[in-house]
Amino acid sequence: MIRVLVADDQALVRGALATMLDLEPDITVVAQVGSGDDVLPAARQSAPDVVLLDVHMPGKDGLAAAKELHAELPACKILICTTFGRPGYLVRAMAAGASGFIVKDAPPEQLVDAVRRVYNGLRVVDPVLAAESLATGPNPLTVREREVLGAVADGSTVAKVAKALHLTEGTVRNHLSSAIGKTGARTRGEAYRISEERGWL
């Protein structure tokens, strides 16, 4: 019997995924959580074989939760199942220790098959997303550039961002300029949008 933990912030989606998986004769859902912060504690308690993780959740996001889970419970397989099929997310998920990455609009039988495959030690990646990831290439942004771009997303001024991140205003401008150049954007807002769409942030 394959023991599965389902982590998704949308209660209806989480319940539907759990119900669908529980219908399979060789799969049982042992826990459900709606926050990234709850993933590791629930996994410690329920000892799942596979954790089905959404990317966007309150608290830690699914990618941070995957990294934490992989570090503490490396035998537990991680399958990312998300609405946001972005190339950058795929790369970051695999780097965090995930064994698979599929999108929520995949047919139900594909999700069930993916759970079985990662349980058996195989990698499962949505083929369209894999192709997009190869075409897009690796994330060109440094950690600091991602941090600065994220900080200006709400329209914060350079001065405010510099104070919040303990940087000089000149350093913030340099990071923004570099991020704008790397994304091919014309403004910092456009650089943020492009980076977000590609899953680089």
Image (cartoon, rainbow, N blue to C red):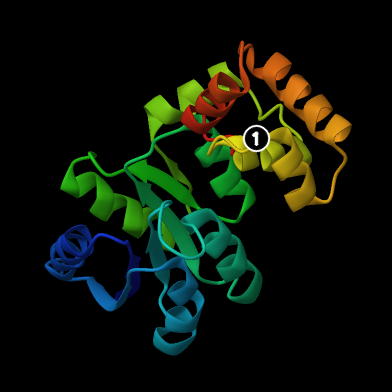
* Identity of the residue drawn at 42% across and 55% down: 79
Identify residue for label 1: 149
Which of 98/117 is in front?
98
Up the image or down, 192 lies above or below 23; here it is above
For residue 174, side relative to residue 99 (left or right): right
Which residue lies at the image location 41% right of the left edge and 67% below the top edge? 50
Label 1: few (<14), some or many (≥20) within 10 Å?
A: many
Could you tell me if residue 143 is visible in this image? Answer: no
Locate residue 168: give its quadrant.
top right
Residue extending farthest to the bottom is: 45
> For the image shown, how many numbered marks are present on the structure?
1
Q: Picture quarter containing residue 42?
A: bottom left
Location of residue 12 in the rendering, given as x and y in whole percent from the top left corner: 16, 61
- Give the residue type that dot 1 points to: Leu
The residue closer to the viewer here, 159 or 72, is 159
Along the line of sight, the residue nearer the viewer: 156 or 181: 156
Query: Which residue shows up at 42% across the image and 73% down it?
Result: 49
Whether residue 194 sits left or right of residue 174 in the image: it is: left
Residue 130 percent coordinates (x, y): 47, 29
Q: Name the quadrant of the C terminus.
A: top right
Q: Position of residue 129 (x, y in %)?
A: 43, 29
Q: Would you place residue 189 above or below residue 122 in this image? A: above
